[in-house]
Amino acid sequence: IIIISACNYYLMEEFELEDIPGVGRITAKKLRAAGIRSPRFLTMLNPEELMEIADIDNPIKAARIIREAKRLYGIEMKPISAREFKEEYLKWDTISFNVKALDELTRGGISVKELVEFAGEFGSGKTQICHQLAVTAQLPPSKGGVAGSVVYIDTERTFSPGRIEKIAERFGLDNALNNIYLFRPTTVTDLEECVFKLYNLIEEKNVRLVIVDSIIALYRAQLKGMEWLARRQQRLNYVIDFLKRYAERFNLAVVYTNQVLQQLNLPHITMKLPAGGNIIAHAATHRFLLKYAKDDTRIITVFDSPRLPRNASVQFRITEQGLMDVE
Ligand code: ADP
Ligand code: MG
């Protein structure tokens, strides 16, 4: 079996925009004005996107800039054997929850290069999970983390510095807030802008986890009704696709939360399923569903995953110090 993989080039040497053949002072200025500081960013764009982002009106020129940027870094699509891939894959870092039950369910935590969705009703623990991971990602590998910083995109205005401090205290982590870069977009357009502009931050601050809490709220509130459905799904898809690119290119994990909708309404049976339709259904690598149990206990179930058994579930508690095992 042969699979295609882009090379891992995040350790490669750095170039200036002017090092790209065909990029002169004027084009470089345009690119910088659009927030593109490194030729490396260009290697993850399509010409159409570059035209839009950097106001370049010639598609041939846009394609050429991207091609030359890739050549600069020696990036080309080439196959690796599935065996090589397996070896690479086993080396992917994971971010532990530092909760035994959750680590067992997920086989070690959240893996870099993957997108993980947590869906559930209000109060089911989605935001608490995000807070916990925003702390544990910063821990050294010996403590289950990846010693990275975290981007937290808070579309629901529920990020709590106090919760972060409490959780960090438990893990003996100082200055946890300093390594979390917070965005609070208020519109879908804001969200798109902050996702597209993450590139420099990821590169400069060693970001290893990007959290979006939630991925769906702004779209549901702002692009309402059937007449906007297609557009809404398209824009949502684009943002998620960009997150996927970062995950792959920068060896980072992406976690986002999703709301649930009443889907099945038979007599005596109501079932709540994740929102967002087909786009969301296919976007994440692993999807989990959260539900209330007794008091501070919650149940988390594998909803969809390529390697975790469907419907496997465990319980955990939400406490003042963050997520904990049930005794
Ligand atoms: P959502 O799924 O809506 O994002 P949250 O992750 O915000 O839900 O979870 C809310 C739950 O977390 C509430 O039931 C609340 O009791 C619990 N919780 C929040 N803060 C604390 C705290 N400081 N101590 C204990 N439990 C808390
Ligand atoms: Mg929440």
Image: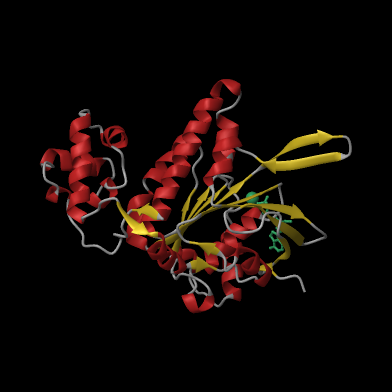
Q: Is residue 62 above or below residue 151?
A: above
Residue 153, visible in the rendered structure: yes
Q: Quadrant of the N terminus?
A: bottom left
Lateral position of residue 117 relative to residue 314, left or right: left
Residue 162, visible in the rendered structure: no
Specify the color scheme.
secondary structure
Residue farthest to the front? 1
Foreground residue among 296 and 103: 103
Residue farthest to the top? 227
Quarter of the picture for ligand 1?
bottom right
Lateral position of residue 162 relative to residue 84, left or right: right
Foreground residue among 232 and 286: 286
Number of marks in the rendered image: 0
Q: Is residue 155 above or below residue 172?
A: above
Q: Position of residue 72 (x, y in %)?
A: 17, 53
Q: Quadrant of the C terminus?
A: bottom right
Residue found 30% across the figure and 60% down from its top: 10
Q: Is residue 150 above or below residue 266?
A: below
Q: Position of residue 32 (x, y in %)?
A: 23, 44
Residue found 70% across the figure and 42% down from its top: 273
* Residue 13, quarter of the rendered image: bottom left
Residue found 17% across the figure and 46% down from its top: 68
Residue found 60% across the figure and 71% down from its top: 98
Q: Position of residue 138 (x, y in %)?
A: 48, 69
Foreground residue among 167 and 198: 198
Q: Position of residue 142 (x, y in %)?
A: 50, 79
